[in-house]
Amino acid sequence: MLKVENLHAAVDGKEILKGLSLEVPAGEVHAIMGPNGAGKSTLSYVLTGRDGYEVTGGSATLDGEDLLALAPDERAARGVFLSFQYPLEIPGVPALTFIRTALNAQRRARGEGEISAPEFLKLARTKSAELKIDFEMLKRALNVGFSGGEKKRMEILQMAMLSPRFLILDETDSGLDIDALRIVSEGVNALRSPDRAMLVITHYQRLLDYIKPDRVHVLAGGRIVASGGPELALELEKAGYERYEAAA
Amino acid sequence: MAAVKQTVEHVAALEKYQHGFVTEIEQDFAPKGLNADIVRFISAKKDEPEWMLQWRLEAFERWQAMEEPAWAKVSFPRIDYQDSYYYAAPKTKEGPKSLDEVDPDLLETYKKLGIPLKEQEVLAGVEGAPRYAVDAVFDSVSVVTTFKKELAQAGVIFCSMSEAIREHPELVRKYLGSVVPVSDNYFACLNSAVFSDGSFVYVPPGVRCPMELSTYFRINAENSGQFERTLIIADKGAYVSYLEGCTAPMRDENQLHAAVVELFALDDAEIKYSTVQNWYPGDPETGKGGIYNFVTKRADCRGDRSKVSWTQVETGSAITWKYPSCVLRGNESSGEFYSIAITNGRQQADTGTKMIHLGANTRSRIISKGISAGKSSNTYRGLVSAHPKAKGARNFTQCDSLLIGKQCAAHTVPYIEARNGQAKFEHEATTTRLSEDQLFYVMQRGLSQEEAVQLLVNGFVKDVLQELPMEFAVEAQKLVAISLEGSVG
């Protein structure tokens, strides 16, 4: 699925990723942990093609296709989805409209037909019920006046409806209380499947109690400095990142 | 929202300014320049009664003593008023009596513009499809008015201004120039002297006009000014909804458009006036060409409980100078102004409204959405005032500006004057830049940059689009998309 090799990237001329390599096979969930400023969010933006994140070396491919050559919307159409740490407010655009516009844009780009209105509404009703989102809320402008927890749930709803293949969750647990965390995690777990892969970026072990990773990587100083099984996350929780920061 | 989808679909297929074609039609011109003889020529051409000619000549005399206003936040080279044609009409011996007599080239032009001029085509449409009567103005002259008979059955008069002057002089004399006085301002005064045609509407007491009325203005001839005059009167308890659409071909020379629109609402009457303005905006790089749109629009809410609502989507013109206003004279009368003004390239817009509260318990509402892109400048200028007698007057104003890119400008200039202690005015204003964060967020979900801008902009203007009649809302949404093409990146 995702293969990143010796990736270098800079923001405003300052190198943030310094030779990062990572492989996430289909069907697996990998966690990226690391201290503040290690380059975790930069990695998610570089993989999704945000302006201002300049790739200065290395490669990133999705099923063999060069991701870095594609525009953000082209990557989305190929199934790359980023759940934002801070989801944006979109005034005047109801959540339903937003998701439908996005879904149809992706389907068109893939040469599929647009989804019919009844089919779309049915999907929206089912998925929002699963995430315990009041359907009426989807008629409001996306994220405008939503609480932190509501915004995160809305991210997962978009994810469930757009049905991406490669999912990046950037600090999805931040700002969530324990109930919301459980609901969001259930939503994410429901998307686990043999033909999908996930990259879960997080500060804390807490989220990984709910979304169990197959592999855990430590990102420090712009590179992956350690990789291991789920036990690595527990170890980090106890010992902290200091050791790795020193190593980086 | 289907309209958003439609915008996204249509935009790729459309040219930047798709109305920039010229129709080769034999034109009848007045000699270039402006003097009392030209005024007489225009009046004679239109076979006007003496009182009308005198009215025009008086206006011309006053105009000569006036100065072009300089207070608006727009700049342009000095206009040589002698270097323009003040009358250009498609050449026909007499005014057309029916559609069959109208020059087929003209009809073709209107067809290109998507105006359902031919009644039969409209009538042949799907049952329940929207129908609206159209008055088409080509350069200076009203070419054809549709659905006349059906409207007459309801007692509604909808005809060209020239015809109204001949056929309904008592109504014209009673109302013309009574809310926009001849010498109100430089451009209105010029219009009063040389206006060539326009639309006239009278809706009798208690009548709800059975269909949308619409006028399409098109400037075609080179170096010609267009000076329409529109007069709409809703008698007691009447209702009418009116839409105005505007296009022009692309030219190297700027063309002057100075219209006057007067609305009158008597007791319990309601007028809804919508404009979708898409004059040629000029070359996006140099600003060359394009229409100077200096328009005076004012409504007199003369009757108690009368209501006037202005909705405008302003996307075209090199320069827009326009303040559709309401004089709230009747007690409990109300005025509304909903505006979307978009500037791109080198466009300059100075637009807004005046709500003048004279009667007791009058209400007004202003929602203005300005969008600036490219190297354009977009100014909202508004006045809300309450007379000492306007006890209990209320106004709510919301002015939002959206900036796209870093080389454009947005300004808000609100004037608020309350001359009694019981007036309640609220003003809210915001200025935001279309953020990189938002754009990236939307693109990450699968929309191209252009589609993302459209989605965000459509969200920004949604409150105003909702005020437009359905079929025009879709058209307006397309226009919004087209005028912002290439505004990012």
Image (cartoon, helix red, strand yellow):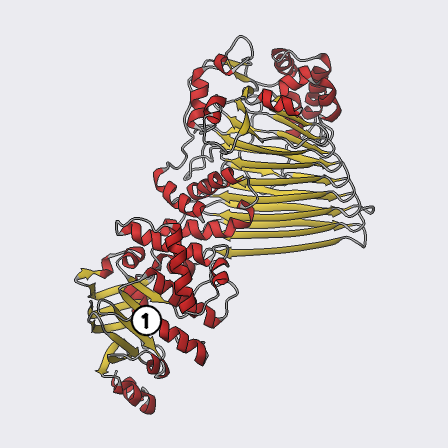
Give residue B474's position: percent from left, percent from top: 47, 41
**Disc 1, SS:** helix
Mark 1 belongs to which amino acid?
Ala
Circle 1 chain: A
Q: Name which quarter of the figure residue A35 lies in.
A: bottom left
Along the line of sight, the residue nearer the viewer: B365 or A178: A178
- Farthest-out residue, right: B389
Report the number of numbered marks: 1
- Farthest-out residue, bottom: A238
Q: Is residue B355 left or right of residue B225?
A: right
Give residue B259's position: percent from left, percent from top: 60, 29
Give residue B477's position: percent from left, percent from top: 47, 43
Along the line of sight, the residue nearer the viewer: B433 or B150: B150
The residue where tag 1 is placed is: A190
Residue at the image point whose x is 63% and y is 56% from the top: B428
Along the line of sight, the residue nearer the viewer: B1 or B150: B150
- Mark 1 is surrounded, within 10 Å at the Cα level, by few (under 14), some (14 to 19) or many (20 or more) other residues, namely few
The reply to whether residue B156 is visible in this rendering is no
Give residue B129's position: percent from left, percent from top: 49, 33
- Farthest-out residue, top: B93
